[in-house]
Image (cartoon, grey):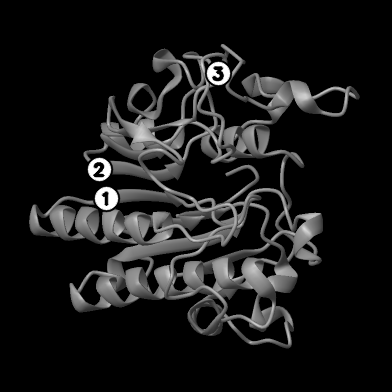
Amino acid sequence: MSLLLQMGWGDLGVYGNAAKETPNLDKMAAEGMLLPSFYSANPLCSPSRAAMLTGRLPIRNGFYSTNAHARNAYTPQNIVGGIPDSEILFPELLLQAGYATKIIGKWHLGQQPQYHPLKHGFHEWFGSPNCHFGPYNDVTTPNIPVYRNASMAGRYYTDFPINRSTGESNLTQLYIQEAVDFIHKSVGAGSPFFLYWTPDATHDPLYASKTFLRTSSRGLYGDAVRELDYGVGVILKLLTQLGVASDTLVIFSSDNGGATYAKEMGIIIMLRTVYKWCSCQCVFNVTFLALIIGLQ
């Protein structure tokens, strides 16, 4: 399951973008299913993610917004709340069914330890509780942390560089490699798996690795989209190479539609699987790429 930030339907070639810079996602769409009437539960990251993972409306799962610019549904560094323990998340159910579960990228459902993904159905985590805002790096507002499971692996900008002048960062490549390693490990162990892949390169401040910088006709935002498309291609190719593509449900979406700086619009969702449904009880892997929003 892949959930991307601030990405609009107009970013993809399959929906008519003239640049045609998303060959892997376009191929995924051609081989799978498009859901053009899939709606986000909220126009902000946190409540839309909470709705997707719980299957419940934001007003019911604790991440709701008012008319105060909708900002009380957002979980920045100075917010101490998060997803309630009373909520049952999708990965918690898969955990009970024997799945290996991992989130890679942005969580955004609470930054305090009791709200972290390892407390809510995930075996593993590499990423951050928040977006990559900054740099701050001062006493009152430290740079946002990056976690490896329950331990802090470092912080954005200081330990995981993002060059605000050039837009260069290797974060997406790290997230791709984390996905590859997790899939290899899960398949090798004979375990069904749930991968929640949520990189945030298309959220301002934008970034892309050196290989993809200045390769898009759409500027830095296009560079980030191209690299994420590449990452999806790597994951899909690996599933085929390992012989589990026919047993894996892959879903790709965006959390709350295109950002104004992208000059594109809408929510995107694609579902790709060659899994043959049958009347027997079956176990299949789930790969959630980028970001999906809405209710299950």
Three-letter amino acid code of the residue under disc 1: Phe
For the point 65% across and 19% down, the residue is 62
Residue at image mark 2: 99
**Residue 64 in view in this figure:** no
Residue at image mark 1: 193
Sequence-first disc among 2 and 1: 2
For the point 56% across and 78% down, the residue is 29
- Label 2, label 3: how far apart the Cα atoms are: 24 Å
The answer to whether 76 appears left or right of 251 in the picture is right
- x and y percent of residue 115 in the render? 45, 19
**Residue 233 in view in this figure:** yes
For the point 62% across and 25% down, the residue is 76
- Label 1, label 3: how far apart the Cα atoms are: 25 Å
Number of residues whose C-alpha sits closer than 10 Å to that of mark 1, classed few (under 14), some (14–19) or many (20 or more): many
Image quarter where the N terminus lies is: bottom left
The residue sitting at the right extreme is 67
For the point 29% across and 66% down, the residue is 247
Three-letter amino acid code of the residue under disc 2: Tyr
Q: Return the residue nearer the eye: 192 or 14.
A: 14
- x and y percent of residue 275 in the render? 36, 70
Residues at circles 2 and 1 in contact by the CB criterion of under 8 Å:
yes
Q: For marks 1 and 3, give the one nearer the viewer.
A: 3
Sequence-first disc among 2 and 3: 3
Sequence-first disc among 1 and 3: 3
- x and y percent of residue 123 in the render? 26, 34
Q: Secondary structure at mark 2?
A: loop
Q: Secondary structure at mark 3?
A: loop
The answer to whether 121 appears left or right of 209 in the picture is left
Q: Which mark is residue 82?
A: 3
- Label 2, label 1: how far apart the Cα atoms are: 5 Å
